[in-house]
Image (cartoon, rainbow, N blue to C red):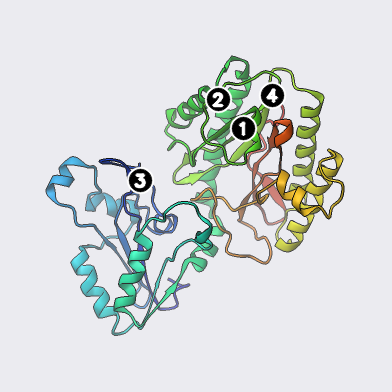
Amino acid sequence: MEKLKGGLLVVAGYTGMQKTNDEEFLFAQEGNMWYLSGIEFPDWWLIIDAKRGKSWLVEPTIDERHRLFTESLAAENAKKASGINDIISRDEAMSMLRAAAKTHPLAYTVGPFPHHEFFSFTLNPAVADMRAMLERTFVKVEDFRLELTRLRAIKQPVELEMMQQAIDLTAKGLNDVRTNLHKYKHEYEIEAELSYAFRATGGQGHGFDPIIAGGANATVAHYFTNDSPLKKGSFVMLDVGAKVGGYTADITRTYAVGKPTARMIAVHDTVRQAQQEVIAILAPGLLVEEYYKHVEATVKKAMIDLKLISSAEDEEGYRRYMPYSISHGLGVDVHDALGKPRTFESGMVLTVEPGIHIGKEKIGVRIEDDILITEDGHRNLSAKIPADW
């Protein structure tokens, strides 16, 4: 309400998406809609009028046949989930918005993810449909995503509690896998063990599609097939995270299957050392720009030590062996934005995940931890998960 400064915000939840001929994908809510409302069912809207100091949920129109056939959210349960007592129909919402346009020439909404033009998949249409409807109704429509991102970036105690539970559940699953690693013959066996661990005690399952990448598969940053046999004398990289209370963990560990070679040990130890050096400087007030300069210098030195590149000027080689950013925000979404901050702030949670992926040697190592920026430094929320084997 304070951030809106008397304005009007209208947010669309995602709609269901087709999976196969007559089946839809398991639904996942748009992160901002969930953060603001707790609603985990498709096609709901949220209206917040800061001038009136009120919020409304808008329920989708569902005919009786679909209500009998497919699970939907009852109004009473929506009230419990959101804390919002006013639930209105689509027709009532449209009448309300047309009336609001007379006193609110500007409406805010949540726009599409920035840089979505680089995605290789189709966006959920609900966000664009909402903006198009608002543009037909209001004089001006602006994106409120950045302000919401900045709110979401600073985690409240209840959020940190959920995140720690998700991390602890991930820790248990990974530690069990680490103990029993000699028993697994295929990547999918490890995936199955973690899927069980993340649901058996009441967690919401995986916070994102797990990566269980053995041998050469670990040289691909995002490998999802998880079907290959595990070979002795190679690594298996596990990039996974349980979800609890709407918040996800994101941890990566790389374990040796059987006895590792000297080269494997050298790569793993070098990545681990680089990660510790990067984590050590995290603190409130640290310039994000300075952080990434330190990251680049540290990881390039690691690659030079491993004789992968010959100088710090080799940008092409650097990106060949680590083709992704070392950090991202974490929370409701596995890739939570931090709101384009100039400096890190207390309450932010981010990953630190250096990796070196050497295709020609069939060696891929990534080590990732979840780090909370505290008032006087940082805390590794996933420190209890051993990084060795």
Residue in view at x 21 percent, y 64 percent? 90
Whether 79 is drawn above or below 389: the answer is below
Residue, disc 4: 234
Looking at the figure, which quarter contains the C terminus?
A: top right
**Residue 385 appears in the rendering:** no
Asked whether the residues under the numbered discs 1 and 2 touch, taking CB atoms below 8 Å apart as contact, a structural biologist would say yes
Spatial CA distance of label 3 from label 2 is: 28 Å
Residue, disc 3: 27
Residue in view at x 67 percent, y 53 percent? 374
Which tag, 1 or 3, sits closer to the chain's start?
3
Circle 3: is it few (<14), some (14-19), or many (20+) Cα within 10 Å?
Answer: few
Q: Position of residue 346 (x, y in %)?
A: 64, 58
Which tag, 3 or 2, sits closer to the chain's start?
3
Whether 313 is drawn above or below 205: the answer is below
Spatial CA distance of label 1 from label 2 is: 8 Å
Spatial CA distance of label 4 from label 1 is: 11 Å
Dot 3: element: loop
Spatial CA distance of label 3 from label 4 is: 36 Å
Residue, disc 2: 228
Q: Position of residue 368 (x, y in %)?
A: 66, 41
Q: Residue furthest left?
A: 64
Residue in view at x 53 percent, y 50 percent? 331
Q: Amino acid at mark 4?
A: Ser
Residue, disc 1: 217
Asked whether the residues under the numbered discs 4 and 2 touch, taking CB atoms below 8 Å apart as contact, a structural biologist would say no
Q: Amino acid at mark 3?
A: Phe
